[in-house]
Structures are given as C-alpha cells and as structure tokens.
C-alpha cells in the first residue's frame, strides 16, 4: 500500500509502513491542509504584495473605540486618518490631486456614499463589446469616436465630500496623481467607507 500527499506543489509517495504511522497519528490530512494553506499564502503574497496584505489585516481588526467617526487627510504626508471621537483608529496611504487638479482644502462633510461609483467625466470610450477605443479621456473635451460610448473610471467605495471630489479606491503611484479625488488602497477605502456616514466630518489639510 502506498499513499500520495501533495507537498509544495509536488506529489510525494509514502511507503506502507510510514503511511500507516502517519494515518494513525492523523497527520496525512493535516499535511495536505498545511500544503494547501502554504500554497494559498504564497499566491496571495505574490499577487498582492506586502503592503496589500498589511492593509487587509489592519483594516479588518476589531475597532477598540466607539464614537462619532471623522476623517482627516494630510496632503503633505499623503495620508488619511480615521477617528472615532478623539481616538485615531486607522490610517491609510493616499494619492491626492496632481498639479492642475488640486484636492480642495478645508472642512467638509460626506454628502454621498456610492459603493460602485464611476466617474462621470474621466474614463474611456469603448465599443459595444466594452473594448477600449480611446483611453484616458475627459468626456467634456475629447470627441467620442463613432459607434462608441463613454465608460467612466471605476471609483469603488466613493465618499463624496465636495461636489465632484471624494475618497475612493484607486491606483497609488506614491505621489499625488489624481484629478482631485483622494485615492486609497482597496481594503482601506472599504474600511473608511464602512465607518463613514452621511454628514461625517472630512478635514483636508495642506
């Protein structure tokens, strides 16, 4: 009798005597589960990177503080902070508006929440099969090619705090790069979105 187990993506043959001992100890199912877990962890690490894994973990930790939520954004530090009362409960890397598209500074309130928001201005012109015909367009200025339509850029977990400006999930190149909105990593955008309510205070500092 031979037994095969999966280990590090390879099939390992275990002889009869060894297999009997491992079965008796209940170790073969455990070894298979362990190898599957290691493979999953390695895949997640390769796909998402260290920063994303950290965001996933920290954004899903139980909140230690109660109280009214508020959000503070530092453009200089390129960071956003979530508060409960006077207690800071979370922070996030951001990418704010680039030169010519500055993010507004001041005290605001969340005026709209949209989990599956799309831009009404920036995006692509696509054909009937959603294949991109003309990329990175401004629908107010760029002419629409024949037989195409405008598809706004996806902006998940959109927290609008001023008309046309909000916090949302998006690409973070490490510098201010947006059209004025505040981009955040996926898990952090979801965390801030879940905590905020209509009327939540948003303070944007230089």
Image: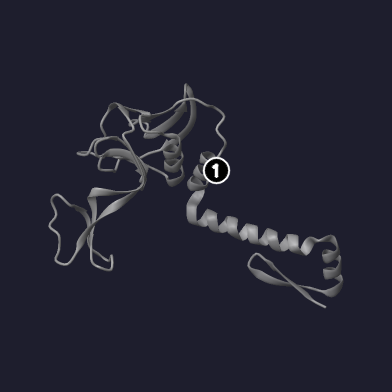
Q: Residue furthest top?
A: 86
82 relative to 98 in the view: left or right = right
At horizontal 37% and vertical 39% (from top left) the residue drawn is: 94
Describe the colour scheme in one phrase. Answer: one colour
| Residue 187 shows in the view | yes
How far from the left and from the top, in percent, is residue 72?
A: 38, 28
The quadrant in which the N terminus is found is: bottom right
Picture coordinates of residue 66 (x, y %)?
A: 52, 26
Most extreme residue toward the front, as rendered?
198
Foreground: 41 or 61? 61
Specify the quadrant that holds the C terminus: top left
Q: Is residue 97 above or below residue 107?
A: below
Q: Does residue 169 appear to the left or right of 129 in the view shown?
A: right
**Is residue 206 at all visible to an observer of this figure?**
no
125 lies left or right of 110: left
Left or right position of 2 against 132: right
Q: Residue at x 84, y 74 (%)?
A: 16
- Which of 26/101 is in front? 26
Residue that extends furthest to the bottom in the rendered view of this protein: 1
Above/below status of 144 relative to 187: below
List the residue tagged with mark 1: 57
> In this view of the protein, which residue sits in the foreground, 143 or 129?
129
* Total labels drawn: 1
Which residue: 48% across, 33% down?
A: 90
Judge whether 91 appears above or below 134 on screen: above
Q: Secondary structure at mark 1?
A: helix
The spot of residue 146 in percent (x, y) is 14, 66
Q: Is residue 46 above or below residue 198?
A: below
Quadrant location of residue 199? top left
Residues packed near mark 1 inside 10 Å, few (<14), some (14 to 19) or many (20 plus): few
Q: x, y percentage for residue 164? A: 24, 39
């Amino acid at each position: 009798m031979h037994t095969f187990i999966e280990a590090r993506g390879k099939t390992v043959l275990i002889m009869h005597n060894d297999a009997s001992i491992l079965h008796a100890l209940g170790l073969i199912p455990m070894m298979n589960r362990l190898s599957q877990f290691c493979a999953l962890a390695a895949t997640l690490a390769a796909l998402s990177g260290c920063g994303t894994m950290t965001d996933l973990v920290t954004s899903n930790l139980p909140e230690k503080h109660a109280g009214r939520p508020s959000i503070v954004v530092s453009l200089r530090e390129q960071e956003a902070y979530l508060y409960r009362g006077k207690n800071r409960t979370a922070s996030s890397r951001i990418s704010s508006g680039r030169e010519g598209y500055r993010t507004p500074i001041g005290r605001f309130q969340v005026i709209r929440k949209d989990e599956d928001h799309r831009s009404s201005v920036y995006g692509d012109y696509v054909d009937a099969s959603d294949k991109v015909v003309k990329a990175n367009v401004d629908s107010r200025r760029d002419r629409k090619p024949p037989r195409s339509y405008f598809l706004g850029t996806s902006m998940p977990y959109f927290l609008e705090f001023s008309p046309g400006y909000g916090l949302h999930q998006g690409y973070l190149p490490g510098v201010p790069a947006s059209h004025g909105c505040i981009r955040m990593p996926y898990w952090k955008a979801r965390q801030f979105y879940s905590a905020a309510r209509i009327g939540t205070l948003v303070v944007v500092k230089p």
